[in-house]
Amino acid sequence: MNASFDVRESRDPADTEGSRPSDHPTQLCRICDINRETSICSRLPKDEFTRVLSLRDQFQFPPLHTIFREGDRAAHIYALTSGSVKLYKLLSDGRRQIVGFLFPGDVFGLTNLGGYPYTAETLNQSSTCRFPQKVLDPTRESVPMLERRMFDLAVRELMRAHEQMLWLGRKTAQERLASFLASLARRATERGQPESPVALPMSRSDIADFLGLTIETVSRTFTHLKKLGVIMIPDNSHVMLNNVPLLIKLSEGGAE
Amino acid sequence: MNASFDVRESRDPADTEGSRPSDHPTQLCRICDINRETSICSRLPKDEFTRVLSLRDQFQFPPLHTIFREGDRAAHIYALTSGSVKLYKLLSDGRRQIVGFLFPGDVFGLTNLGGYPYTAETLNQSSTCRFPQKVLDPTRESVPMLERRMFDLAVRELMRAHEQMLWLGRKTAQERLASFLASLARRATERGQPESPVALPMSRSDIADFLGLTIETVSRTFTHLKKLGVIMIPDNSHVMLNNVPLLIKLSEGGAE
DNA sequence: CGGTAACTTGACTTAAATCAACAATAGTGG
DNA sequence: CCACTATTGTTGATTTAAGTCAAGTTACCG
């Protein structure tokens, strides 16, 4: 169950991580020019900015591609520039917890230890900027703003993780799904996208493993929210929000 | 339910946070000399170290004291030097999720936003070093190692949060409690304390709100682990680990 | 088209929650 | 030091939200 299709057709023998060089060499690393408030390179002075840019590798991945696995040696920090990615941890018997969905501007692969603490897998065609730890490390020391940026990104993820702990530990299925949809909508607006037709690039199984539920419960809960008139589902990867205030109220347990 | 006793007898009118100046002015901020691998001041060169030290305030708090509340303006970063602290988030109807228990050497109050994302409350008599954001911020920029230290601490917390998300989303009550005990034991050894009589400075209700369970389930699960012979409970705030390998196996779902 | 995978819906089960005593522990003041 | 009380923790009986098992539908893709 929850098989991850290992698409590795373009493994670069010189590199330990299956991936393929971007075929848009002229495309700017979007993390550096869009949404400057939430990405690695935002707020850097121009010369330092260029210096950091020179360190990056650009990679593109097909859908359902495993970028790295939990435990792999953590040689790079990644910034997602297009597409979407899921991060998950596994138990030995196959139970899975998705600890985050990522969208353009998000960063992943942060760790202190030698190995990545989760597996990273694309949901759809995605591009990343990749910064080698070995090269980024000394740069961070000499570019205080970069170091601060890394800190801010880590803290932002930490706060998101705390929020999700509240969902998982204390919210009902309906509250979790409502929280999830509201969160996706908010993040979309932060990226300058419209709030309402929320894109769901992940499967029901992914949503279940993110919210600590089963696919059946996720499906039933979608149906229930639909019956309440809060959402409409034109197709399985899009949700229209008819009543965001009510959705938020439902996400906090208001209106039983 | 879960009332927090507001012990505010020594509120300093010049300060927005109820607390009282340490009555051990000569005591070193322990975060700076013990367990240098995991605390703010570790690995700093001597002169920079002194400079950072000069910024700190020392505070001592009685048991069950609220250090700050979720949403309070985040004016300080705290380092716990003795005692223990819980961090929690509340839903409007009183449901509570404890997002972390802290021990000497741990840091809390990290945030990007204006307000703290959780409430911090002592479990027992505790001391902290407190660094004002306003003063720490410029220092961080000029002391790269401090900035890096902050980053490392944030990432460490993030990885711990991800681990707990796996517990909350995908583990059974027994697996969660076993994971919890194993984690407390590991952290005790990291602070140079013995592994086995694990101290539980928190109530059953706190454990329940940390693991996303009820007090009844926590109690039953303790009893069950006791019957399995994995633990002994000399008193309600101590647990003897008789068989750590088995405990770890149980925490991962091995041996149903 | 035809077939597989993804999703939905229904019937039934179960792990944990809730409700309800009861026991142990820790304070408090006489 | 010992009742007396309040608080905290344990155990048992019952309920329930979500899980499991089992068909169906729908959508996707060669």
Image: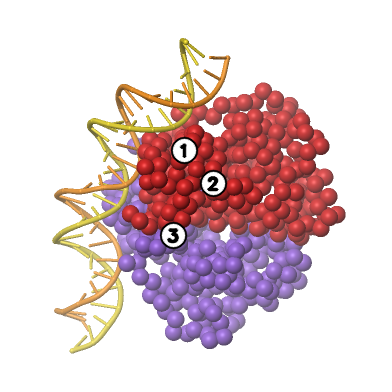
Chain colours: A red, B purple, C yellow, D orange
Residue name at image x 37 percent, y 46 percent: A228
The Cα–Cα distance between marks 3 and 2, rounded to whole angstroms, is: 32 Å
**Closer to the camera in the image, B132 or A25:** A25
Mark 3: amino acid: Ile
Residue name at image x 46 percent, y 69 percent: B121
Residue B33 sits above or below residue A66 on the image: below
Residue B44 sits above or below residue A210 on the image: below
> At which x and y percent is residue A223?
38, 39
**Closer to the camera in the image, B198 or B90:** B90
**Closer to the camera in the image, B96 or B142:** B96
Circle 3 residues within 10 Å: few <14, some 14–19, many ≥20 = many
Locate residue C13 relative to residue A218 in the image: left or right. left
Judged from the image, the secondary structure of the residue bearing numbered disc 2 is: loop
- Residue A55, picture quadrant: top right
Residue found at the far right of this picture:
A47
Mark 1: amino acid: Ile
Locate residue B224 relative to residue B166 in the image: left or right. left
Residue A173 is marked as none
> At which x and y percent is residue B73?
56, 71
> At which x and y percent is residue A73?
65, 39
Residue A196 is marked as 2
Q: Which residue is mark 3?
A: B98
Locate residue A3 relative to residue B90 in the image: left or right. right
Q: Quadrant of the C terminus of chain A?
A: bottom left
